Image (spheres, rainbow, N blue to C red):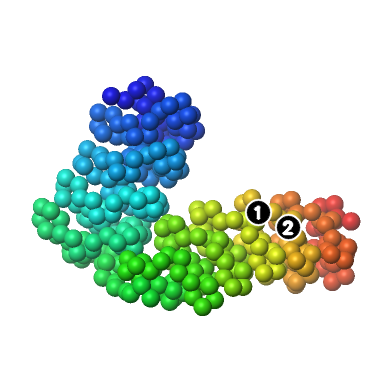
Amino acid sequence: MPSGLDRQLIAAAWKNDLAEAGRLIKAGANVNAVDDTVQSAFLIAASEGYLDLLNLALANGADVRSLDSYHGTALIRAAERGHAAVVGRLIQAGVKVDHVNNLGWTALHEAVLLGKGTPQYVDTVRLLVAAGADRSKPAVKDGVTPMHAAKDRGQTAVSAVLDTKASASALLGAASAGDANKVAAALAAGAPIESRDDHRRTPLLLAALNDRVDVARLLVQLGADPDAQDDRKDSAWLVTGVTGSVAMLETLLPANPDLTLRNRFGGTSVIPASERGHVAYVRRVVKTKINVNHVNNLGWTALLEAIILGKGTQPWQDIVQTLVTAGANPNLPDADGVTPLRHAESRGYTEIAKILRTAGAR
């Protein structure tokens, strides 16, 4: 029987009350304790798609082999509901992919038989395939395979995932081309997720360079490293500042990229984004913990690059305003002692100079 603390933890888990769950665990509650319906905080987090709660449970001794009242794993519960991010995390944690519950189904069966064929289920199926799930495994009771079930239910996109075959050597090309189904198949064939090409670019970096969001999401959910750098010191995270892709930025943030990582010019991602006029990207990235006053090897901040290498037009005016609002120092000079205001005035960037003076620039 669960203790009083355990019952409180289970109640907090249903509410997704992360703070309370953390407090209870510190007080001695057991993340694996089950109630009379065979629910634990760990299993609840999986079935309800509470990723932060799941991570808390895993960090505090969650038993990845634990089973629910259907003799199913946490992975089966998450797959049934299409919680792709949770599915990926459980795969990383080592939950058995082809475990069969007492209905005779694996996680892949449940993702198809009880799924809806929507994008979240397509992502879920890709993750399971990439992890080596048996696409041809028959259900115990009626012998249906995931492949046949998807086709019978008209789940076209899911069927495409299940039908795709690829060798391990196809991984890098598929990542670059944006073929997420082939990426999953190549991983299933044994390709290392951190494979490198001749320039030491990983699949995730290639996906970021080419703005292949579906591929990047798959790789991130399987634990790909957003900080792996190539022979030019580019990483998946750093190149988002070059491409300006907010969608890729959002895809990579759950992987906790190193916001202090530097490119070959000694800059962080906000600097090339400011130089290139990527307004939407700058507006989003300054909401992270990135240092807007970082100085690169040229002695320039993002603010200086927006002025020195920008064009002074509306996009760069918006970027300058965004940066100073986010805490960029308007008086931080370049390596020669020239301030942002003097650079703006010397280039005739009247509107930018006005923004800087309002911010207290000298």
Determine which of the numbered discs, if any, sits on residue 290 in the image.
1
Q: CA distance from mark 1 to mark 2?
A: 9 Å
Question: Which picture quadrant has residue 172?
Answer: bottom left
- Left or right, 296 with reference to 166: right
The residue identified by callout 2 is 294
Depth order, front residue of 152/62: 62
Depth order, front residue of 93/148: 93
Q: Amino acid at mark 2?
A: His
Q: Which element type, helix, strand or loop, lies under badge 1?
A: loop
Looking at the image, which residue is at 23% across and 63% down?
A: 135
Residue 228, position as x, y percentages in the image: 54, 64
Position of the N terminus, as image quadrant, is: top left
Cβ atoms under marks 1 and 2 closer than 8 Å: yes
Q: Residue furthest left?
A: 142
Residue 205 visible at all: yes
Looking at the image, which residue is at 46% across and 65% down?
A: 194
Q: Residues within 10 Å of mark 1 (few under 14, many from 20)?
A: some
Looking at the image, which residue is at 40% across and 72% down?
A: 171
Q: Residues within 10 Å of mark 2 (few under 14, many from 20)?
A: some
Q: Which element type, helix, strand or loop, lies under badge 2?
A: loop
Position of the C terminus, as image quadrant, is: bottom right
Residue 122, position as x, y percentages in the image: 33, 61
Count of marks placed on residues: 2
Q: Amino acid at mark 1?
A: Ile
Question: Which picture quadrant has residue 66?
Answer: top left
- Left or right, 336 with reference to 292: right
Looking at the image, which residue is at 38% across and 69% down?
A: 191
Residue 81, position as x, y percentages in the image: 31, 49
